[in-house]
Amino acid sequence: MLDDGQDLGAPDAILINGRAPYRYDSALVPDGLPYEIVGVEPGETYRFRVHNVGVSTSLNFRIQNHNMRLVETEGTYTNQQNYADLDIHVGQSYSFLVTMDQNASTDYYIVASPRFVGNPRWHEVAGVAVLQYSNSKGRASGSLPDAPDDHYDKYRSMNQARSIRMNTSAGAARPNPQGSFHYGSINVTQTFVLKNEQPLSIGGKRRRTINRVSYSPPETPLRLADLHNLTGVYAADFPATPSDDDAPPRVASSALNASYKGFLEIVFQNNDTDVQTYHLDGYSFFVVGMDYGEWTPDRRSEYNKWDAISRCTTQVFPGGWTAVLVSLDNVGVWNLRAERLDDWYRGQEVYVKVADPLGYNITEMVVPDNALYCGLLKERQKPQVHESNSKSSAQGDAGWSNRLLATMILVVAAVIFS
């Protein structure tokens, strides 16, 4: 279906922790579906960890009548500030502190609704859970809390993203470069400008490209090919800057060469009409700038060189760009991909090869005994022993607040029931 150019379409529902929406509207939500109930005590403060694990859509998250104090994202403490709602793009994670300071005359809605969508069917879809005080006197009812109305303000979501800054005074492990927040004074040693465009047809199939290259995974994994000195599996010739628009698009197994212990600048240029989200395996990066328009080198003067957030997944708004800085201290061949599953499938990804020129690879673990071999190395495959461990443990985060009672993890995704 995707090869033929069709879209995934709108889902039947957005799930919260695998559960259907609360029946806030009898015309939209069938009766009898299990929904998520978050039980709380009045006056207490809870940490909510919210993850957008959907396949294609940005979501706006909000809790009716409650402020959400943002404290963390993807492993980095943030400057603590309150939000009434927050856009969470595909693959992103946030932690909020929420104090139960409302009266218990009724339950309250927890909402995750789609953002930046054109299909009218999406506007009938929302993830809805229930926040229930222990002394609640009634069920949640009425309209959902309003979603952002920013049709004429395209900077609302971008300014919200820009407001998320690193907490430079928190007593926590520092992001790379280790022990330092002075990323803004480090000289950039290499720059990649990666431009995605609207989908196009290559070889009769709908494809996505970065710098006019649509990635095709080879049968043999790239890192194993390197370890066993195989040639011809992939080429390290991916263009580090956009190709001429007249250059023919191509499908290739190609990687970017990056310099070990260098300081890399990556600029994502989104020349499409949808929000893109990019994730880099193996690293976190500093999100130093984003805006609309075409990125040019003089935009570096606008970078945040003091308290940019360090994370591993960033959004790129349609017709805009996002710039990140990353310290290359982790040897390997790392996937850099669009988090929208249909775009990823269609080739909107690339691998970044970070090799130690001395060959020591001290940051890399040895290949495990149960590694999976395929392609040109399939003869090396060993029998697999599958084990499961049902034991689990949970740790509290007592350092967040002296009134923090518990951590709520809300995993949000879309589903098609049929």
Image: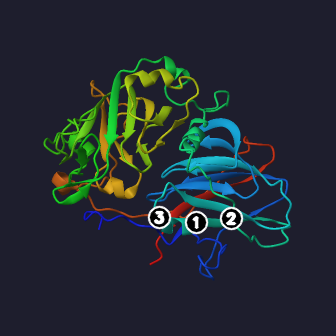
Mark 2, Cα crowd under 10 Å, few <14 / some 14-19 / many 20+, is: some
Give the image location of residue 210, x and y in percent: 29, 43
Above or below: residue 211 compared with residue 123: above
From the image, tell me which residue sits under label 2.
144
Q: CA distance from mark 1 to mark 3?
A: 34 Å
The answer to whether residue 304 is seen in the rendering is: yes
As drawn, the residue found furthest toward the left would be: 232
- Say which quarter of the image contains residue 140: bottom right
- Is residue 77 found left or right of 116 in the rendered image? right
* The disc label shown at residue 126, or none: 1
Give the image location of residue 88, x and y in percent: 55, 50
Above or below: residue 346 compared with residue 124: above
Q: Which tag, 1 or 3, sits closer to the chain's start?
A: 1
- Is residue 41 found left or right of 157 in the rendered image? right
Q: Nearer the viewer, residue 59 or 354?
A: 59
Q: Which tag, 2 or 3, sits closer to the chain's start?
A: 2
Q: Residue at x 54, y 26 (%)?
A: 304
Q: CA distance from mark 2 to mark 1?
A: 10 Å
Closer to viewer: mark 2 or mark 3: 2
Q: Nearer the viewer, residue 392 or 80?
A: 80
> CB atoms at circles 2 and 3 under 8 Å apart?
no
> CB atoms at circles 2 and 1 under 8 Å apart?
yes
Closer to viewer: mark 1 or mark 3: 1
Q: Residue at x 17, y 45 (%)?
A: 233
Q: Secondary structure at mark 2?
A: loop
Mark 3, Cα crowd under 10 Å, few <14 / some 14-19 / many 20+, is: few
* The disc label shown at residue 388, or none: 3
